Amino acid sequence: MAQWNDYHHEDEDVDGEERDESGVDYKSTGRDSLVFLVDASKEMFIKGEDEEPSPFDLTMQCVRSVYTSKIISSDKDLVALVFYGTEQSKNPRNSFKHVYIYHDLDLPGARRVQDVDGLRGEKGAQVAGETMGSGNTNLGEALWCCSNLYSDIKLRLSHKRLMIFTCRDTPHGGDSERDRQARTKASDLKETGVVIDLMHLMKPGGFDVSLFFCDVVSPPEDEAELGLQMEPCGKLEDLQKRVRAKEMKKRSVARLNLCLGEGMNVAVGVYITALQARKPNAIKLYRDNNEPVRTKTRLYHTQTGSLLLPSDTKRVQVYAGRQIVMEKDEVDVIKKFSDPGLELIGFKPMERLKLHHHLRSAVFIYPEEEMVTGSACVFTALLRRCSVRKVFALCKYTRIRNSPPRFLALVPQREEVDDGQAQIAAPGFHGIFLPYADDIRTLDTPQLPTASKSQVDKMKEIVHKLRFKYRSDAFENPVLQQHYRNLEALALDLMAPEHIEDLTMPNVNMMDQRLGSLAQEFRDLVYPADYNPEGKTAPKRKPAEVAGGTEKKPKVEMSEDELRGHVQKGNLGKLTVPVLKDACKQFGVKVTGTKKQELIDALTAQLTK
């Protein structure tokens, strides 16, 4: 009979593994879509001071960065690249003048990355001028063209976003009629669920958003989203940061009710803020046409070979040497403890939460106003009171049906923004997974020598010298980076993959400069005078060497009659090379080589004379 672990049903899941919560079902949630609407006017190609990249070049670098990140992290999402204010027109039936669709709304790929690379730098500006040129601007028709891109897609789209890149705050030069048409079309797009964002770039004299674009862009979807920024972007890092904050749609792994008491429920979403990045699984292809193959599992009877249906199998668990057999319905009843949701148990001071309670990465809890009206208000009040009183909320957490319940410590976090009003930390609760009594182990710590006060003080000086501000987002996984650089080089036909810097390697020279003589002083305090940290460990001595002598194998001497007997019987080949060499020395046989056959030939020639 099949073991419990061999049986899997689509409604069953295990909540203990983080990777189970990371998957995204595109069939049920839909795909994200992103359209880059880029201004191709002459002002976009003007370089900044000190030969800084032009706004067009900055935009192309940013578009390429999003393309490559989508290929790695969200290859099922759709992206498009459209230029407006061009001299040439390229769209279905060319019904929209001065609008050039460079990439339709489709999956990102290596070919598209190569196309964007061709538009970068001075050479790319020349290619853009020859291919599209710069002409009149009609943003209303450009928005209409983008609306058709969305309507032509037959797939289910969960999120539709449009990003406008420009350095002109008055794209129509004061033409009120075209301004009105653009505002009207933008309003129509927003009614269909399209979110319009502005990524305005630096221009001489500054960029005034209030002149036109404040009526075009969409307001923030929620309090956690970055709103319209008044200051333009002058550097690539700032532009990429804003685009990344907009294009990455936050998906919740679960939407649950937080029960605060009888009849008091608040709707919340559960999000994962940190998850270990892994290499994607290899996809098996059929060798004749490179089409993906599907793997199916079937159960057969070991004796008759007949196909078994799910109703023909049962589940068994071995307990005390006995097989406890159960039906599937009985297993479902046993595995169900409570309905999905968060149930408040009480509050505890923050001092009661210990670092060694950490089991896995935390989840983030945020209110879902759309599910239950008033959730945001109650959630905010709870967050503020927990933050003021410095307590955490203890809850029982059941993510889905049939998943085991866990204890969560909800730690409050207030909102934080930087100087550019970009959100650094969103308001909400961090859900810390707490261990059960069964998860806590009692360790027998070994009794080791205790360091002296002088040794401890010296190590404190070393630790103080080597301290630095650690940020996890400053270190990339070198294995993953090298893996994706190799894939990128193969896909883009590059001569060699891009070099990566392994930031996990310590800077030994800088550490030596900071420490100075402290390392040697600590070594003198702890280790003996003849200690060599770089020396090799002494090889293990054999028992004979420990006794004071060297163990040697005794020589095996053979008489001439014994050797002649081996020659006559043809058994010299059964002797080892050392024995044959000793025989040659014993009878004065001169040999020109050391191979076994040469030794046999020399002995045979000597003894058959």
Image: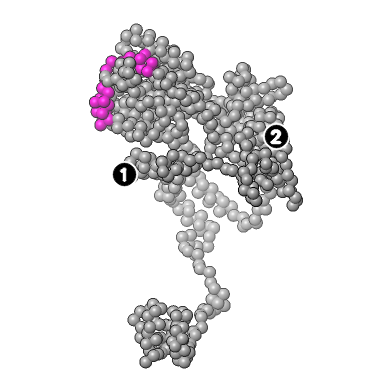
Nearer to the camera, 529 or 90: 90
Who's the residue at 46% across and 39% down the image? 292
Q: Secondary structure at mark 1?
A: loop
Instruction: In the rendered structure, find residue 265 and report the number of the disc placed on it.
Output: none
Residue at 36% over, 27% down: 103
Q: Main secondary structure of the magenta part?
A: helix
Relative depth, front residue between 348 and 62: 62
Of circles 2 and 1, the one toward us is 2
Viewer-closest of 583 and 153: 153
Q: Which residue is mark 2?
A: 336
Instruction: Answer with the quarter of the image where residue 371 lies.
Output: top right
Q: Residues within 10 Å of mark 1 (few under 14, many from 20)?
A: few
Please indicate whether residue 36 sits to the left or right of residue 541 in the image: left
448 horizontally vs 515: left or right: right
Classify 228 as above or below 459: above
Q: For the C terminus, which image quadrant? A: bottom left
Residue 489: x percent and y percent?
Answer: 36, 42
SS type, badge 2: loop
Question: Disc 1 marks which amino acid?
Answer: Met
Q: Report the residue at 42% width, 44% height from top.
A: 287
On the question of residue 417 being in view, the answer is no
Q: Does 140 lie within the magenta span?
A: yes
Taking depth in this image into account, of 381 and 599 the one nearest to the observer is 599
User: Mark 2 is on which residue type?
Assistant: Lys
State the CA–CA distance, disc 2 to disc 1.
Answer: 56 Å
Q: Residue at x 53, y 72 (%)?
A: 541
The residue where tag 1 is placed is 495
Instruction: Give the extent of the magenta segment.
Output: 122-145
Q: Does the segment drawn in magenta span residue 137?
A: yes
Quarter occupied by residue 488: top left
Q: Position of residue 544 (x, y in %)?
A: 55, 77
